[in-house]
């Protein structure tokens, strides 16, 4: 007999039919009621065992975490909280789970404890819900771009260029770590390395995506990126996924329009397709915040917050205007900010971004036209000579979720910026070629996928929205 998923059975009209399901035991009460889950839904299905008709030794193997196969009749449930249940006729224990050592028992576990059990934490309701939302969001990303004429490009993970100019990269090498070959200057001779040059794990697929946009028009890359940044915060990972569209002939205004439309579309998609998981995560957040002071609680329940973002226009504000707002703000005047804003040109920190979004405008904010000195070399210089056509989208609870810009399409200006920053021109010869052969205005942005999942699920730590987080001093699993 074909086996069904629990999601199918709970939404079907198969009552009084014979069914077969596989899953993991959540609880087994009174030697009679098995709560079973197979990962297809937040909801369990109750399986009722007539214990007098089953071997006692078999029933002793039915414990939390065990994998079982159950066949029986789907009937209308007599109990509260479920519409149907299964009257068990056949029970097979596929894999036992020792109740004395299985760590995911039916009780409340701290998120810190569950991070240490990352291989099993997805068996909990919270992590199963988060990962289903993550999967649906991932599909929604591809769906949006494919429906809007974009082509997916797989950009390299191993690269010789530093797109951000930050230098916080993981080196890729096959040289002997203890005795690497040296050149005449006494430095490591990377010519003898696998690629014949110094290479790293990518921090962004942007530069390569630009080359494809200048031939295919509209492209996007969605893949893993790496930052060797020693940040132990709730918002940083060493390995994370980036969504990076690049569009030929788009200026900054069109880029902001695209980013806003994209975010609203994918949020609407999960509101429609992840309703039960979002409802569960919303209640989890409400319960968690009961112990917090009122000032630290969310202004809106999770689903209302997602709808608010999806249904309202983002506020567009220049960097200069934002600096004026921050300088005259109460937390700045009373020195409540960790980083006091004193003058134009300051690099905004998370506390400033969140103040603008959560306290001042109370909606998502797009900041644009940043000082050139605090932004990357590839961003288009404005006519004032001191700002660039950059934009960041700021979200409540997150801070920056999107960073993008109109790219510098003028060869002479780009060469001047590269020279100023001491970037090796030869390393970027191919990137400069784009400005020699059919250059044109083009723009793009990067969105850290985990930050989007963080916002969509209401989780408080980015380590809890990726299956196996990679952070400083942690590469377990």
Image (spheres, rainbow, N blue to C red):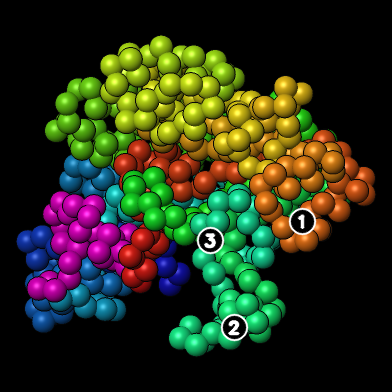
Q: Which residue is mark 3?
A: 169
Q: Residues within 10 Å of mark 1 (few under 14, many from 20)?
A: few
Seen in the picture, residue 388 relative to 112 is either above or below; the reply is above
Residue at 29%, 79% in the rendered image: 94
Query: Which range is magenta?
Result: 99-122
* Disc 3, SS: loop
Q: Position of residue 83 (x, y in %)?
A: 29, 45
C-alpha distance separating marks 1 and 3: 19 Å
For the view shown, which residue lies furthest in the right direction?
437
Residue ID at (78%, 61%):
426
Between 410 and 63, the residue placed more toward the observer is 410
Please tell me which residue is depicted at 63% across the width and 42% down the height of the picture: 376
Check the image and report above or below for 119 versus 242.
below
Query: In the rendered structure, which disc, 1 or 3, sits on the residue that comes first in sequence?
Result: 3
The foreground one among 437 and 417 is 417
Which of the two discs, 2 and 1, labels the residue nearer the N terminus? Answer: 2
Query: Mark 1 sits on what residue?
Result: 425
Residue sitting at the far front: 185
The mark lying in front, picked from 2 and 1, is 2
Instruction: Measuring from the top left, give residue 242's x and y in whole percent.
Output: 56, 51
Which of the 4 image quadrants contains residue 245? top right
Q: Which residue is mark 2?
A: 182
Question: Which quarter of the rendering shows the C terminus?
Answer: bottom left
Main secondary-structure element of the magenta-colored stretch: loop
């Amino acid at each position: 007999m074909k086996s069904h998923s629990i999601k199918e059975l709970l939404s079907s009209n198969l009552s009084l039919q014979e069914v077969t399901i596989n899953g993991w035991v959540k609880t087994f009460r009174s030697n009679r009621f098995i709560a079973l889950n197979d990962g297809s839904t937040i909801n369990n299905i109750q399986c009722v065992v007539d214990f007098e008709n089953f071997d006692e030794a078999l029933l002793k193997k039915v414990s939390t975490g065990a994998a079982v196969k159950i066949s029986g009749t789907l009937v209308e449930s007599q109990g509260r909280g479920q519409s149907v249940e299964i009257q068990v006729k056949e029970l097979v224990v596929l894999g036992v789970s020792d109740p004395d050592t299985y760590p995911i028992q039916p009780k409340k576990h701290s998120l810190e404890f569950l991070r240490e059990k990352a291989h099993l934490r997805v068996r909990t309701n919270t992590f199963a819900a988060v990962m289903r939302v993550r999967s649906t969001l991932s599909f929604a990303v591809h769906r949006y771009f494919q429906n809007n004429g974009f082509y997916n490009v797989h950009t390299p993970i191993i690269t010789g260029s530093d797109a951000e100019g930050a230098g916080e990269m993981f080196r890729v090498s096959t040289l002997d770590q203890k005795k690497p070959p040296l050149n005449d200057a006494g430095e490591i001779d990377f010519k003898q390395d696998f690629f014949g040059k110094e290479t790293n794990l990518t921090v962004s697929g942007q530069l390569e995506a630009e080359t494809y946009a200048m031939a295919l028009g509209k492209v996007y890359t969605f893949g893993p990126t790496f930052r060797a940044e020693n940040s132990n915060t709730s918002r940083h990972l060493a390995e994370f996924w980036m969504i990076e569209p690049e569009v030929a002939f788009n200026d900054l205004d069109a880029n902001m329009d695209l980013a806003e439309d994209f975010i609203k579309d994918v949020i609407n998609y999960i509101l429609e397709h992840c309703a039960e998981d979002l409802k569960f995560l919303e209640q989890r957040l409400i319960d968690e915040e009961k112990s917090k002071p009122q000032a630290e609680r969310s202004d809106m329940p999770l689903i209302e917050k997602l709808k608010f973002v999806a249904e309202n226009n983002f506020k567009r504000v220049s960097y200069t205007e934002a600096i004026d707002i921050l300088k005259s703000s109460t937390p700045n005047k009373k020195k409540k900010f960790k980083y006091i804003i004193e003058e134009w040109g300051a690099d905004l920190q998370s506390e400033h971004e969140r103040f603008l979004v959560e306290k001042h405008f109370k909606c998502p904010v797009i900041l644009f036209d940043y000082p050139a000195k605090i932004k990357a070399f590839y961003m288009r210089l404005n006519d004032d000579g001191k700002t660039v056509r950059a934009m960041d989208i700021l979200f409540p609870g997150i801070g920056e979720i999107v960073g993008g810009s109109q790219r510098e399409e003028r060869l002479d200006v780009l060469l001047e910026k590269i020279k100023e920053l001491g970037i090796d021109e030869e390393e970027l010869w191919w990137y400069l070629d784009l400005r020699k052969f059919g250059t044109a205005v083009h723009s793009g942005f990067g969105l850290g996928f985990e930050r989007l999942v963080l916002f969509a699920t209401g989780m408080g730590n980015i380590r809890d929205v990726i299956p196996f987080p990679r952070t400083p001093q942690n590469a377990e699993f």
